[in-house]
Image (cartoon, rainbow, N blue to C red):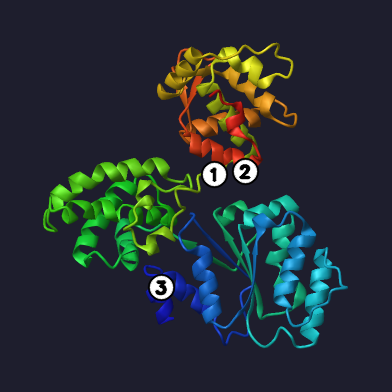
Amino acid sequence: MESLLESFPCRERELQQLQIFINEGSELLPESVFIHGQPAVGKTTITCKYLESAGALIAYVNCIECYSMRLLLDKIISQLLPQDPQPNVRCDSFMALVHLLKLARSKGSLNSRPHVLVLDNVEYLDNLGDRCINFFAALQELTLIYTLTVIFISRVIPEKFDITPAVILHFPQYNKDELTKIFQLFKPPYISEELYSNYISTALAVFIRATRDLNEMKNLILDNVSKYMEPINRGEATANDTLLLWRLVTPHLKASLNSAYLGIASENDTDPTKPELQTELITHKKLRAFDLPYYAKYFLIAGYLASYNSPKHDRRLFLKNHGKQRKKNRKDVSKSQTTELLGPKSFSLDRLLAIFYAIMEEKASLTVNLMSQIASLVELRLLAKIGDGVIDNPKFKCMASYDCVAAVGSTLGFNLKKYLLD
């Protein structure tokens, strides 16, 4: 228990509550435990680590991965009964699961130690049936195995579900003092504790307004430590010049907010003097393929092509029967190079949709969900909306670089260079 408190500071109350209801010598466990809280507050990690330390047999299932009942139940059986593999037994219904667990109880397989079924992202169980969550809440009652309990982990409050769990445990968000204590665990070896504490206070003042996600905030803070140390290394400031260091690092901290939640790192990752510890925590800058939805990737490619190609060349680039091609002279080559240096040009929504359907290999109906992908790209600042006057046919501009769009295109097998004029 002491090692868990050192590894997970500021979670003493939650660990003590878990210890009250589930411990190594428990012969009677609660029917169900519902754990809820915001993302990145330690719900799943702390729960699983505590169960391992308590000697419980854990069957962990992430419900977002289970798109069918058979897949869900097979994962549960393979983890709850690893010592009794039965490849010929189908477990595709709730009654089959209850039968297999009762059979294992009669053999004495589930009576030796606590057995815990952890269902993470339990809100996705509604996709498998309205009464799916109710079944797991009553699993102990149906099987009469009192050393078996089910732990539901969700971002949604328990009042939204039609169940009455025996225990409800809430993981609150970390406040600023708790975040400061947590980030002390990730102090790089090349910076003193006092200087690192001052840096954390400065960084949290900027980041805590934009995100409370612990993982995202950790990436942003560790990514900018070297920027905080640069004035000291160059001799422009000392460790005691707190105000000067704050003024110099604040622009870098605010700029790094543009890459929050995008899965990319800032320019600091290319610094060869940066320790290897930090490069393991964030995505390398060379991996620029954003984790975008399928149609959003094509919209991003279409937006880039519309920004860097002239509308008069659309017919030749995207239509098969485009007529006879005119030979390009030297003047046209120099003009296209000048156009690229001038940056992206604005384009209309109609032109974006036309290019989108031209490069798509399959037909896609123009629905609200499809149009929402464009709004998502604007929110991510990959596309910029130009002006607010025209509502029927707004104009946009692509803000992504060539390397970024080319990496996105490579995930789809799309050759971006083929559709760009030299």
CB atoms of marks 2 and 1 within 8 Å: yes
C-alpha separation, residue under disc 3 versus residue under disc 2:
38 Å
Going from the N terminus, do you reach mark 3 or mark 2 first?
3
Q: Residue 356's x, y, as percent?
A: 64, 26
Going from the N terminus, do you reach mark 3 or mark 1 first?
3
How packed mark 3 is, by other alpha carbons closer than 10 Å (few <14, some 14-19, many 20 or more), is few
Quarter occupied by residue 324: top right
Q: Which mark is residue 289?
A: 1
How packed mark 1 is, by other alpha carbons closer than 10 Å (few <14, some 14-19, many 20 or more), is many
Q: Residue 342's x, y, as percent?
A: 40, 21
Instruction: Decide: is 239 above or below 114.
Output: above
Is residue 300 among what the camera can see? yes
From the viewer's perspective, is 171 left or right of 122? Answer: left
Nearer to us in this view, 383 or 285: 285
Q: Nearer the viewer, mark 3 or mark 1?
A: 1
Going from the N terminus, do you reach mark 2 or mark 1 first?
1
Tell me which residue sits at (68%, 80%) in the image.
Answer: 146
Give the amino acid type for the residue marked by disc 2 in the picture.
Thr
Helix, strand or loop at label 3? It is helix
How packed mark 2 is, by other alpha carbons closer than 10 Å (few <14, some 14-19, many 20 or more), is few
Tell me which residue sits at (67%, 56%) in the image.
Answer: 65
Q: Which mark is residue 7?
A: 3
C-alpha separation, residue under disc 3 versus residue under disc 1:
33 Å
C-alpha separation, residue under disc 2 versus residue under disc 1:
7 Å
Q: Which residue is mark 2?
A: 411
Tell me which residue sits at (71%, 68%) in the image.
Answer: 138
Instruction: Decide: is 147 above or below 369.
Output: below
Give the amino acid type for the residue marked by disc 1 in the picture.
Ala
* Quadrant position of the N terminus in the picture: bottom left
CB atoms of marks 3 and 2 within 8 Å: no
Give the amino acid type for the residue marked by disc 3 in the picture.
Ser
